[in-house]
Every structure is written in structure tokens, then in C-alpha cells.
Amino acid sequence: MSYLFDNWGQVIDLSVRHLWLSLIPIVLGFAIALPIGWYASRHRRLRGVLLSLGSILYTIPSIALFAVLPAVIGTQYLDPINVVIALTMYAVAIMIRSATDAFSSVSDAVLDAATANGYAPAGRALSVELPLAGPVLLAGLRVVSVSTVSLVSVGALIGVSNLGSLFTNGFQRGYDSEIFTGVLAIVVIALVLDGLLVVAGRLLMPWSRVTRPSGVAA
Amino acid sequence: MSVASETIDWFTDPANWSGDYGVPNRIVQHLGYTAVTVAIAAALAIPIGLWIGHTGRLRGLAVVFSGALRALPTLGVVTYLGLFTGVNLTATVVALVVLAVPPLLAGAYSGLESVERQTIDAARAMGMTEWQILTKVEVPLALPIIVGGLRSATLQVVATATVAAYVGPGGLGRFLIDGLAVRDTPQVIAGSLLVIALALLLDALFVAVQRVAIHGHPAVQPSRS
């Protein structure tokens, strides 16, 4: 723990970077996957194709994706944008599955009732389907959040500084307290984000007990 | 385009295909670590997961425990252990086992939970012992989901073994880590492509195994694959 107390400022600085590198992909991934998942839940064939694409994407090792992206999309080699784009891709890959499951779980009878009550398709999607899909969406978002916070650290291997830099630096200097501090800070960030998601879920969906991520395919 | 042609040059250079540092040996090492890790993790997690699924006890604890393990960054675990073990396989295998346990555990207990209560009651009413219920009813019916857990554990290990090469002696990750260290972009890209290809190949293999697990038991509906 001595490292933490001696380098408080640096740990805070790296934590803030780490948080940004996590939050952008989590939010972007959710925003991109939500409409795609909604659309896919209405089209069976597309759903199969998207889910296979997602699981193929998710098998690509993160460090390989970080390293290959600059060559594919022409970004700078050490630019943090590579990490953000790669992690957004993973977030979308996980979240599309959850979003599809979530919207598929809304029963047809409820949809018919909403239509009969005069909801237009867009209004029905927002006011009926989205709230009912909420608990499953939240479970998916929690898996995305934990795995993204943990994966950001791999970015340190391609020179993008974040809490993972404490791992590479600590290993090179043989300083176990530095690595331990990094692990601790990452776990704390992951748990705090997870807690915030649970609280947000309770506030936004007071009618439903928050479902836990059971995720075999996490 | 020069990076692309340099990468092709890397692949066609016979020097990269022979000896201890050649592609075939690196692939064998990579698959070896993966097999050892998944075997150890399965030996730990599957019996516990089956017990949790069969008895319904300690499920909450298992969920919290797996969640906490998932939050642990593998690079941090592997570098921390690596400081104490030195550059050998121990740190790599332990860190990857930590990674593989949650999906295996979840596959085992959620697989058993997916078996219909009535089926289990019927088996019990027919006089089956608890052991028979587990091995002859629950496990066969839960097999697709258990194999699904094995699949996601294996794929995560194959992918993350790359990162673990940072402190490890071998595997395909070496091409990436060494290439990054000396800014040898073609080698980094070649290493990445090899890992991606290996991961996709293993995934295809698991899809086939899952089909067999389902078709071997026609009564089982393929749950969301």
C-alpha cells in the first residue's frame, strides 16, 4: 500500500484517465447496441447473423485489436482513440446480445395491447418496450461495465497510459506495491460503476427487482 | 500499404516458421497453456458449480464471487504474480485460471438450474439416488449450457494468454509483446492475425461440439446459443 500513499497524485491522475477510457466505450456501446438490438429482436434472420458477428468479434484478443486497428483505420499508433474504438466494439458485441434478449422478452400480448391502446410504433418502443426490457438491459450493461474497466488496462501494453501503466511500470521496476495499487484501483472503479448502475436501475425501474448478470457468455 | 506487404513478407519468411521462436512452436505453446489452464479451472469450478446447481445452496455467494473475479484485471494479476515467480509458466497459468473460473462456474450452475423442476421430481419419484439424478438426468440435460461455459472460458483464455505473454516465456503473445517493444509493426500485426485465426478456429470447433451436445440429447431444446 505504500505506493498508493507516496504517489497519491499520480494514482488519481491515472484513475481519471482510466475512467474516461472506460466510460466512453460503455456509453457509446450501449447507445449503438440499443437500437440494433431492438431492430434485431423483430427480425429473426438478422438476429442470428448479428449474434454470430458479435461472438466472433468478442473472440478477437484485445491487444491484437488495439495493435491492428491503426493499420486498418489509419489512426496514430499510440493514440488512445484505438483503445476507445476497440473497447466500444467489444461493448457493442456484448450489448447487442443482451439488447436482443431484452426486447425479445417483452411478450407479444403486451405489444398488441399497447397498439390497441393507440401507441404509434415509435411511442410503443420508447414507452412500453424500453421500460419492460430495462432489467435485462441493465444486466447486460453491468457485464459490459465490469469487463471494459478491466480491459482498459491492456491499453498500457500499447503505450496508452491508464491504471494499467502501474502494472507494466511496476513489473519492470520489480515493485509489487505499485501493481497491487493498480489492481485495487481498477477493482474499486469497477465496483463503484457497478453500484451506480444498480442504484440507477432502482431509481429508473422502481417496479422491478434488479436482475443480476448471470452471463455464461459474459 | 507498406505495412500490409511487410506483414506478408513476415508470413512468407521461412525464418519465422522454424525453431523455438517459429510460428508452429508458438502455436503449440499457446494451445498447451490454454489446455492446462482450462483443465485446472474446470477441475475446480465444474464440481463446485454442479454442487451449487444441484443443491441450490450458496448460489448468491457464487454470483458475487464470480463478479469479483471478473473485475480483476488479468494483466495486473499476471504481473503481480510474475514478480514473485519469475518468468515461467506459474504466474501465467494462475492468472488465466482466475479468468476461466467464472464462466465455467456459471455454466455449471445455470445449466443445472435450466433443467425443469418436474423432470427432477419425476426422477426422484422413480427412485433414483441423488447421484443418479445428477449424472443421468441433470448433467445430460444441462450439457449444452455447460459446454457453453467451457467455450467461453476457453476463448477468453486463448485471447488473454496473449496478454499474459508479457511475463510468460512463450505462446503467440510473444510476437505481439516483442514486436511492440521494438516497434516491429509487421510482426505485431502477424502475431495478432495468428491469435485471431486461432481463436476463431477454436470457436468453430466449439460450435461443432455444442451441436453434438445438443443432438446427442434430442429432448433438449437448444437454448440461446
Image: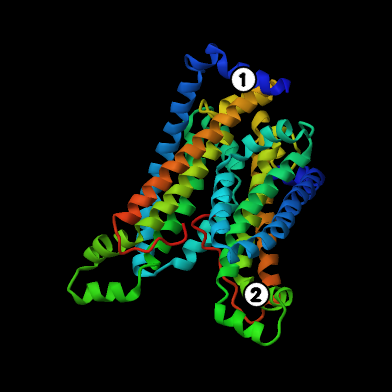
- Residue, x 75% and y 37% (percent of image)? A160
Dot 1 alpha-carbon crowd within 10 angstroms: few under 14, some 14 to 19, many 20 or more: some
> Label 2: which residue?
A129
Dot 2 alpha-carbon crowd within 10 angstroms: few under 14, some 14 to 19, many 20 or more: many
Instruction: Indicate which disc residue B62 carries.
Output: none
Q: Are marks 2 and 1 in contact (CB under 8 Å)?
A: no
Relative to the observer, which residue lies in front, B98 or A119?
A: A119
- Residue, x 64% and y 45% (percent of image)? A151
Q: How is the image coloured?
A: rainbow
Residue B66 visible here = yes
Looking at the picture, does residue B190 appear above or below residue B37? above
Relative to the observer, which residue lies in front, B28 or A197?
A: B28
Distance of label 2 from label 1 (alpha carbons): 49 Å
Give x and y (percent) for residue B51.
35, 62
Looking at the picture, does residue A195 appear above or below residue B174? below
Give x and y (percent) for residue A153.
67, 42
Residue lying farthest bottom? A117
What element does badge 2 sit on? helix
Looking at the picture, does residue B201 appear above or below residue B117? above
In the image, A213: left or right of A84?
A: left
What element does badge 1 sit on? helix
In the image, B175: left or right of A68?
A: left
Quarter placement of the N terminus of chain B: top right
Looking at the rendered structure, the kind of residue marked 1 is: Ile
> Label 1: which residue?
B8
